[in-house]
């Protein structure tokens, strides 16, 4: 891997600080050098990063007792004690002390090839200060983003999230427009299954439901105000209903570019969806006439668990786009589109790219059909 610039400041690299933090407790350097994700994140050979830490006094060699404790399991130490004719009972720390006291030179020789390092006091203070600053920044960013979500501003809330992640986690992190889309669908959902929920509670419910989407494992219920009154059985159920409605609306919106109809499908072992929703199984709807889900009188605590798939078959024949995506090497496929104009090819390629971006086809399918279309120009 290429070496970083001589003036590279690892103190401004979250990945390097995370690496340093791995040595808060004694750790075998050889183990760290094999972490592939580490090589990808720090953008240099981990050996170079560790040697830099050592030169700057951030990593220091461990004491002999720490080396033994880190490098060997309790079973290993008991076996070594037995070989030395020593008592094999007691804690791991007692076994380590017993071995060193009995024959320090032999233990030193046995561990001479090991490179067990730990953070110096200076490094420990730096890492602890960084983690404290990171936690404070996280709490501030979460609160700020929640307030923006309460106001219905998904764009600014996502920018707050992105700024935090870039500063403390991954500087090169790119914006994900699909995450922003998810937030917007939640912030515009108002399913009838929630009953006569007032505007203030609906805004709180929407913002709370967005938080796990934006901040991953952040529990949505923790963000509901204490005076929030659920319009259904519980706060969790209300969140599930809103999330379910947003997800289905998001899918329908994406299918709108490719199909006029969708089919509702339930898993045959579905035990979560209610009887009302299950009656929709295998039914086909025009996109404009699709029922609002979960249904108004839904009794499921999770919301409708159906899958909504685009239907490409129109009036007994395949649509043009359907042919583009799924047809194989049949004679019809070979003959179809031989006289493609540049404009037609561009339109088809654009459609294919949209379907790839929305997860409707695989990259392999996309590349195959792309090659076929270009070959006919």
Image (cartoon, helix red, strand yellow):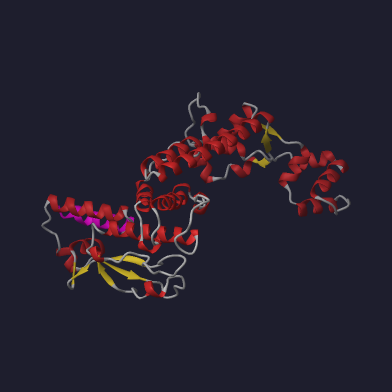
Q: Is residue 75 left or right of residue 54?
A: right
Q: Quadrant of residue 339?
A: bottom left
Q: Quadrant of residue 279?
A: bottom left
User: Which residue is painted at 55% across and 35% down in the image?
Assistant: 16
Membership of 367 in magenta stretch: yes
In the image as oriented, which residue stretches furthest toward the top?
7
**Closer to us: 205 or 343:** 205
How many numbered marks have been drawn onto this rendered protein structure?
A: 0
The secondary structure making up most of the magenta span is helix
From the top left corner, tell me how far across and down residue 41 is, in percent: 49, 40
**Closer to us: 281 or 349:** 281
Does residue 201 appear in this view?
A: yes
From the top left corner, tell me how far across and down residue 246 is, in percent: 37, 57
User: Which residue is painted at 55% across and 29% down in the image?
Assistant: 11
Above-or-below relation of 353 to 307: above
From the top left corner, tell me how far across and down residue 312 is, in percent: 23, 66
Above-or-below relation of 28 to 78: above
Does residue 170 appear in this view?
A: no
Above-or-below relation of 143 to 369: above
From the top left corner, tell me how far across and down residue 52 is, in percent: 59, 29
Membership of 26 in magenta stretch: no
Above-or-below relation of 23 to 265: above
The segment highlighted magenta reads: 362-377
Q: Quadrant of residue 263?
A: bottom left
């Amino acid at each position: 891997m290429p070496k970083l610039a001589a003036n590279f400041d690892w103190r401004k690299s979250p990945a390097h600080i995370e690496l340093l933090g791995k040595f808060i407790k004694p750790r075998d350097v050889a183990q760290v050098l094999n972490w592939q994700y580490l090589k990808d994140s720090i953008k240099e050979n981990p050996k170079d990063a560790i040697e830099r830490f050592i030169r700057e006094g951030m990593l220091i060699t461990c004491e002999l007792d720490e080396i033994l404790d880190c490098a060997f399991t309790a079973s290993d130490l008991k076996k070594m004690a037995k070989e030395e004719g020593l008592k094999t009972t007691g804690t791991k720390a007692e076994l380590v002390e017993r071995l060193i006291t009995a024959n320090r030179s032999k233990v030193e020789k046995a561990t001479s090839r090991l490179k067990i390092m730990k953070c110096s006091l200076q490094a420990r203070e730096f890492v602890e200060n960084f983690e404290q600053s990171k936690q404070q920044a996280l709490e501030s960013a979460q609160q700020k983003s929640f307030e923006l979500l309460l106001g219905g501003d998904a764009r600014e809330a996502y920018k707050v999230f992105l700024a935090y992640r870039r500063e403390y986690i991954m500087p090169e992190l790119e914006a994900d427009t699909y995450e922003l889309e998810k937030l917007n669908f939640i912030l515009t959902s108002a399913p009838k299954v929630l009953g006569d929920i007032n505007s203030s509670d609906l805004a709180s419910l929407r913002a709370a439901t967005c938080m796990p989407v934006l901040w991953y494992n952040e529990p949505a219920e923790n963000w509901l105000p204490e005076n929030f009154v659920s319009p259904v059985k519980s706060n969790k159920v209300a969140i599930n209903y809103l999330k379910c409605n947003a997800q289905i609306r998001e899918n329908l919106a994406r299918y709108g570019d490719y199909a006029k109809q969708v089919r509702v499908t339930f898993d045959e072992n579905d035990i979560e969806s209610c009887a009302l929703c299950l009656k929709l199984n295998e039914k086909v709807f025009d996109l404009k006439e699709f029922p609002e889900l979960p249904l108004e009188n839904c009794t499921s605590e999770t919301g409708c668990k159906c899958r909504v798939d685009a239907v490409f078959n129109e009036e007994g024949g395949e649509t043009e786009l359907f042919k583009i995506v799924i047809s194989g090497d049949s004679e019809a496929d070979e003959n179809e589109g031989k006289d493609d104009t540049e404009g037609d090819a561009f339109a088809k390629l654009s459609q294919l790219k949209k379907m790839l971006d929305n997860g409707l086809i695989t990259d392999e399918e996309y590349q195959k059909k792309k090659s076929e279309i270009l070959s006919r120009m």
